[in-house]
Amino acid sequence: MDTAYAPHPRGSRVPVGLRAPFSGRAWREFLYLFLSLPVSSVMFAYAIAVIALGAGLLVTFLGIPVLAGGLAGSRALGSLERARARGLLGQTVDEPEPIRPSKPGLMAWVGAVLKSGVSWRHLLYSLLHFPWAVFSFVFSLMFWSIGWALLAYPLWRWTFPAYLDQPGIQMWGDGSGNGFYLDTPAEIGFASGVGLLLVLAGPWVIHGLTQVDRVMVHGLLGPSSLATRVSQLESDRGVVVDTAAADLRRIERDLHDGAQARLVALAMDLGLAKEKLAEDPEAAAKMVDEAHGEVKIALQELRDLARGIHPAILTDRGLGPALSALSARCTVPVKVSVDLDRRPAAAIEGIAYFTASELLQNVSKHARATSATLDVWHTADRVMVLVTDNGRGGAHTGNGTGLAGLTERLDAVDGLLIVDSPVGGPTSITAELPWRA
């Protein structure tokens, strides 16, 4: 969200339009445009020199390494421009992908530089930014300086009759002494009013000019969209791997502490019953009966564990019946509504199910709610899962919460988690998943 001149905290009586000309943001942006001319002049001259020298030496072998060195220098200048945009415009642009030669050696490095689209985009920025910097420098400087000068005209009008032998600012003249001057009180007041309008409009004009700079810095000096997507996929792959490892550890822990321990105890009880079978049949029968009860409990634990991995009802009947069965086990009454004209891909169906399961567990454990709703529907190319409750609210996706982990899981498949949970409730959490059939 653009917060160029956001409203002042509650209680301020100064309108944002009157505060803007005195805000630090406006003057930092003006300083950025003011510095753009000398900076872009140096970069433009450097780019022209690199191109001319490299092209001129292409008839010899030296042209290629000279051009590669010039491109590397453009990347260094680009890093300074990113730092300038970060310091004065508040725009953070990620570092582009580094140069990675296929093998050690100077020629491998030269080839990697010349093949790098990032290097050529930095050189292109040096060429394209110069004409824009000239225009934005002249326009912003003239616009705002004229505005401030006219606004303060009543304070310095005396300089014209004192030093220039004129009654005021000359608007037009024919060279023979005839002309129109701003020297009467009404004219002075009108000029000051125009200056006030220019001063008030100045921050917004300057902000609009810097938007072009932001686009150029982000588009030409930042990483390419492909590289950004690859980085995202690598991060998402790490999340998926970590999640899978955590699930395997959970299953191992549940088996070790639950069904496995119970089956070990069951084997010991059956061994004791076997020893007592001959000498005390009644005690042995009693121990066998207890072991039978343990078997039932162990089977139920295994069923619960299997349901936690992937419930059979989800595979056989789809999301509607699976979510109805899931909500029946929730400690809070849940109204379920599933509106899907067909089943999504198995992976998306599974993620939607476990997302709903996680959200309903949060309702049971933390919400202190008396009722909840679970809605699932298909819109355009998305599967929507909405869980609401009338609990105490205050849910958030900060680090260390279950919702943070759920957000990472959804992000791994290009999903999205939206939390609306004011303190005091109610809570509404929406999960968006891509539709894949």
Image: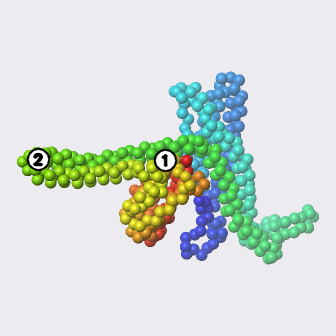
Instruction: Provide residue 156's location: percent of width, then percent of height.
Output: 74, 69
- Mark 2 — residue? 277
Given residues 298 and 365, the one toward you in this image is: 298
Q: Secondary structure at mark 2?
A: loop
Instruction: Provide residue 94's location: percent of width, then percent of height.
Output: 55, 47
Which amino acid lies under the numbered mark 1 shown in the image of this protein? Answer: Ala
Q: Is residue 18 left or right of residue 9?
A: right
**Image quadrant of residue 184?**
bottom right
Instruction: Provide residue 85's location: percent of width, then percent of height.
Output: 60, 51
Disc 2 vs disc 1: which is toward the camera?
2
For residue 104, above or below residue 1 = above
On the rendered image, what quadrant is the N terminus found in? bottom right
Chain-order first, disc 2 or disc 1 = 2
For residue 99, above or below residue 82 = above
Given residues 381 and 428, the one toward you in this image is: 381
Q: Is residue 350 left or right of residue 141?
A: left
Residue at point 91%, 67% (across, down): 178
Q: Secondary structure at mark 1?
A: helix
Given residues 23 and 358, the one toward you in this image is: 358
For disc 2, the neighbor class at 10 Å (few under 14, some 14 to 19, many from 20) is some
Residue at point 17%, 51% (across, down): 288
What is the spatial separation of the Cα atoms under label 2 and label 1, in whole angstroms? 51 Å
- Mark 1 — residue? 346
Q: Is residue 322 left or right of residue 95?
A: left
Q: Do labels 2 and 1 touch, CB within 8 Å?
A: no
